[in-house]
Amino acid sequence: MHQSARDVKRAGKSIAFVPTMGFLHEGHLSLIREARRLADIVVVSMFVNPTQFGPGEDFEAYPRDPARDSELAENEDTDILFIPEKQDLYPPGYETYIIQENLPGHLCGISRPGHFTGVMTIVAKLFNIIKPHYAVFGEKDFQQLAVIRKMVSDLNFDVKIIGSPTVRETDGLAMSSRNKYLSSGQRSSALTLYRALCDAKEMTAKGETRADALIDAAVQTISAAPETSIDYVKICDPDTLEDVAVIDRPVLMGLAVKVGRTRLIDNTILQPGSRG
Ligand code: AMP
């Protein structure tokens, strides 16, 4: 990969990179299409990164289908598919990790300590290997995008980070490789995440400015569905991820919910409306 990246650069071509954990769906494919628009050469990586999973999380069970993934990526005109092995990226004796002080202390970082250190470390390693001009990330993982933007700025990576909108199923469920874990009953419960976000958008558009009221309504909607257990429902500043009490500017509403044993996340931007 180092050699290929060097050759591409020597030929004066640009590289757009899409990091994934594989088990590709339309959300991933939309990022690949965005990468295709941005640069001459599209590199997609597929690697289930062990350092971003905590003990008891689904690293072993995470769905994998490299043959299908390769076909899907090739259909989108991917130039280079990079599928490293765990021992290549984390050989015995590996001991270097990236820490960020504030952003990982919010939202998903609270219930997944160490997760964003794992994410930043693998992304930094992949940036060093692939040397992309652009890297495309989904807004579905809003905190991840924020953490990566901050890392790139703080550590002077020479790469432009592009955020890409969340792709949803026709009924609104945000696409995720983990949706595969859901039974059909759980799939219906999972829809309450999207419904809660839509309700909050509608309430703010109609003039509701109290974050508490919006959060209470979302908690009610989600907890009324079977097999749901809320990790968090938060309304926060999209840059700092600090809680916001009054919605007087665009804010992020983010939520994480376990449906059965599957942890799902989703988010939206709430725009303040005019009362009455
Ligand atoms: P993952 O394979 O889940 O680590 O995701 C790889 C990339 O795809 C990340 O940048 C995610 O934010 C992005 N992604 C995952 N699901 C979606 C979706 N439904 N819409 C847009 N991007 C997504």
Image (cartoon, helix red, strand yellow):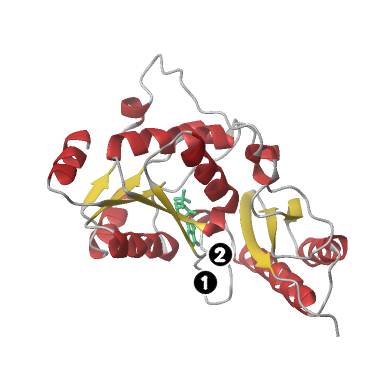
Q: Does the residue labelled 1 lie within 8 Å of ligand 1?
A: no
Q: Residue 217, how many percent across, how many down?
A: 83, 67
Give residue 132's quadrant in the image: top left
129 vs 21, nearest the viewer: 129
Q: Residue 106, how many percent across, how many down?
A: 70, 42
Is residue 168 visible in the rendered image? The answer is: yes
Q: Dot 1 corresponds to which residue? A: 169
Q: Is mark 2 within 8 Å of ligand 1?
A: yes
Secondary structure of residue under mark 1: loop
Q: Mark 2 or mark 1, which has the lower sequence index?
A: 1
Q: In this picture, is 118 found above or below 243?
A: above
Q: How crowded is mark 1: few (under 14 residues within 10 Å), some or many (20 or more)?
A: few
The residue under the point 44% across, 48% down is 63
Give residue 37's quadrant in the image: bottom left
153 vs 53, nearest the viewer: 153
Secondary structure of residue under mark 2: loop
Q: How crowded is mark 2: few (under 14 residues within 10 Å), some or many (20 or more)?
A: many
In the shown orientation, is residue 220 left or right of residue 88? right
- Location of the C terminus (image quadrant): bottom right
Q: In this picture, is 263 found above or below 252?
A: above
Q: What residue type is labelled 2?
A: Ala
The residue under the point 49% across, 31% down is 51
Q: Which amino acid does label 1 sit on?
A: Glu
55 vs 136, nearest the viewer: 136
Query: Residue farthest to the top?
Result: 93
How far is disc 2 from disc 1 in space, using C-alphas? 6 Å
Q: Which mark is residue 104?
A: none
Q: Residue 174, how many percent across, how many down?
A: 56, 64
Q: Which mark is residue 174?
A: 2
In the shown orientation, is residue 258 left or right of residue 96? right
